[in-house]
Every structure is written in structure tokens, then in C-alpha cells.
Image: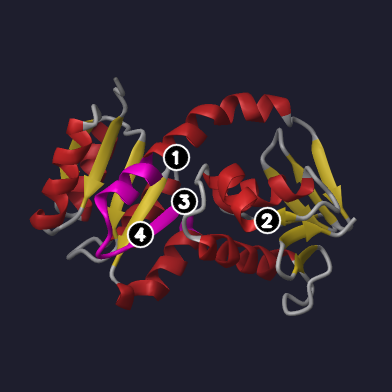
Amino acid sequence: MDSEMILVVDDQQEIREPIRRRLEIEGYQVRTAADGMEALEAFTLRRPAVVVLDVSMPNLDGLAVCRRIRAGSSVPILLLSAKAEESDVVVGLELGADDYLTKPFKINELLARIRALLRRANSEPARKQETEGQLRAGPIMLDTKRREVSRGGQAVPLTPVEFRLLSALLERPGEVLSREMLLDQVWGYDGYDLGLVNTHVKRLRAKLEKDPANPEVVLTVRGFGYKIAA
């Protein structure tokens, strides 16, 4: 039985409580919070394995909570948002959130994504050891040991997800990786939101390419996926 603790943060009880009940049925320990300050207190009291975090909350919103958590922790964060908050989701991903779900959503999809985030988090230490070293493509250098990326010797700050995405591409230079393959390798998902890959590739190019509209490192292979220029 799973014993990981999940922190669920949402100011709407009609959303928060059904999630809590389902997760407990699945064997998880669950803490809930109705606002941002309560969420940070719960997070400090006991570090959860995954944070499910609503974007729009009074006083301290989900983006502020995400920023504070990311300042000292790499715990997986899954954002919940309404369609009208899509621009906030982009900000949340830039702050280091791992994934998002748009309301309304199916509880089974939320559960599947939580499981995938847990699998990825639990396998991360072993993966770090397997890939320890430096990966290069043109002016881009990724140091897997130091978890650093640079372009032409200049440091480039990446979120944890962007780092894993770039690492996945650099490990197989010249090879085309489909969006489905990247979802599986980077997020641990089996064919969910392919747009998640597109969003992160776009943000990766904005940080790494001289001209993001005409990329020279992270290339699109239309109808197939993405690859690193050999």
C-alpha cells in the first residue's frame, strides 16, 4: 500500500474534499489546506511527496506558494487551474511546477498524474547516478552532476522540468523523440497532454536559442517530434 503523503491545496471544499477521499481510498496519506498560508505551514510541518496546488486562491495565491516551495525543495508540484487562468499556468511552469490540470478534470486523470510524478521522483536518484557527466550540443552544455546548464559559458537557469527535458534530448543527439516518448521519459506519463511537451520546448528554446523562432539546437521534426541537432 502506498504511504506517501500528498498535500492538496484548494480554497473550494467541493474540490478539495473529493480529492482527499479518493487519495485516501487509494492508500495515500493526505493533508489539505484551504489557502496559501495554511499550505506553507503544512508543507513545513511535514514535507509531502507531491503537492496538488490550486492557482487561484485569496490572500496568498498558488503561484506565490509555488515560488516559495521551489526556493528550497524539488518536490513535484501539480497545478490546478480554470481555463481563464492559462496565462498563470505558464507562469507557474516557469516557477518550477511540474504539471497542470485544467478544471473541471476527472479524478482518475489526477490520480494517474500523481502516480507518475511519484514514480519519476522515486527514480530520480538512480537516474542521476546513471547519467552523471556532461552533455553537449553546439554551444549548449549540461552538467548532470551539478545540475547546471550553460550556453557559450554563460549560465542558463532552467526549471527542474526544463532540465529533465533538455537532458532527455541531449542523451540521444540526432535521434527524433516523439512527444509521447518525452512525456513518458520526462513526466512518466503515457500519452496524456502532448501540449505539455510543446509548451516546455517553447520555453526551452526561449532560453537556449539565439532566435527561438528559428531554432538551431532543439529542432522540430514535423509529424514526429523533436531532436537535438547532431
Question: What's the coloring here?
Answer: secondary structure
Q: Mark 2 or mark 3: which is in front?
A: 2
Q: Residue at x 86, y 53 (%)?
A: 174
Residue 88's place in the image compared with 226, above or below, is: below
Q: Residues within 10 Å of mark 4 (few under 14, many from 20)?
A: many
Circle 2 SS class: strand
Q: Mark 1 or mark 2: which is in front?
A: 2
CB under 8 Å between callouts 3 and 4? no
Q: Image check: 144 left or right of 157?
A: right
Q: Nearer the viewer, residue 77 or 169?
A: 169
Q: Position of residue 97 (x, y in %)?
A: 44, 53
Q: Earlier in the sequence, mark 3 or mark 1?
A: 3
Q: Residues within 10 Å of mark 1 (few under 14, many from 20)?
A: some
Q: Residue at x 32, y 27 (%)?
A: 4
Q: Residue at x 69, y 51 (%)?
A: 166
CB under 8 Å between callouts 2 and 4? no
Amino acid type assigned to the residue bearing label 4 in the image: Leu
**Residue range highlighted in magenta:** 95-114
Q: Residue furthest left?
A: 13
Q: Earlier in the sequence, mark 1 or mark 2?
A: 1
Q: Earlier in the sequence, mark 1 or mark 4?
A: 4
Q: Image check: 131 left or right of 96?
A: right
Q: Mark 3 or mark 4: which is in front?
A: 4
- Residue for badge 2: 178
Circle 1 SS class: helix
Q: Nearer the viewer, residue 38 or 81?
A: 81
Label 2 to label 4: alpha-carbon separation: 22 Å
The image's mark for residue 101 is 4
Circle 3 SS class: loop
Q: Nearer the viewer, residue 15 or 72?
A: 15
Residue 193's place in the image compared with 42, above or below, is: below
